[in-house]
Image (cartoon, helix red, strand yellow):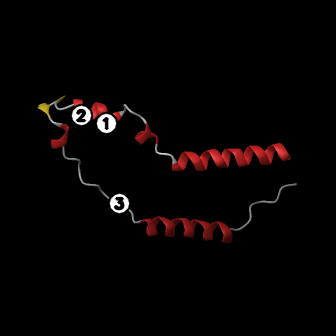
Amino acid sequence: MKQTLLLASLLLAVGAWSATVDLEATSSSGPQAISNEIEWVRTTEGWERPASWQSPPPTEGPLHPVVVAGFIALAGMLALVAPPGPERQ
């Protein structure tokens, strides 16, 4: 039991430490060094700068989450009031 508690608290401590440490700031080379070197990228439309790319606007799903929750609630209610199946022997 002591080993389980020790292992759980060790994992919790490592998780808490990893959530607070910024590893990108401590590394000397990383994505920042690469991004400074890339100025032009070959695309299907020719050579372009990545900074000029425009991402499409975010689209919402066709259903509102309240509608989905309503269907789930309705299915749950129907499951609760459904007649019992045939009895097994």
Q: Earlier in the sequence, mark 2 or mark 3?
A: 2
Q: Is residue 59 left or right of residue 6?
A: left
Earlier residue among tags 1 and 3: 1
Q: Which residue is mark 1?
A: 32
Residue at 31%, 36% in the rendered image: 32
Q: CA distance from mark 1 to mark 3?
A: 38 Å
Please state which of the two labelled residues, at mark 1 or mark 3, is closer to the viewer: 1
Instruction: Provide the secondary structure element on which disc 3 rests.
Output: loop
Question: Which residue matches tag 2?
Answer: 36
User: Which secondary structure lies at badge 1?
Assistant: helix
The reply to whether the C-beta atoms of the residues labelled 2 and 3 are less than 8 Å apart is no
Residue at 59 percent of width and 50 percent of height: 16
Q: Name the amino acid type tagged 2.
A: Asn
Q: Residue at x 39, y 63 (%)?
A: 63
* Quadrant into which the C terminus falls: bottom right
Q: Residue at x 70, y 45 (%)?
A: 10
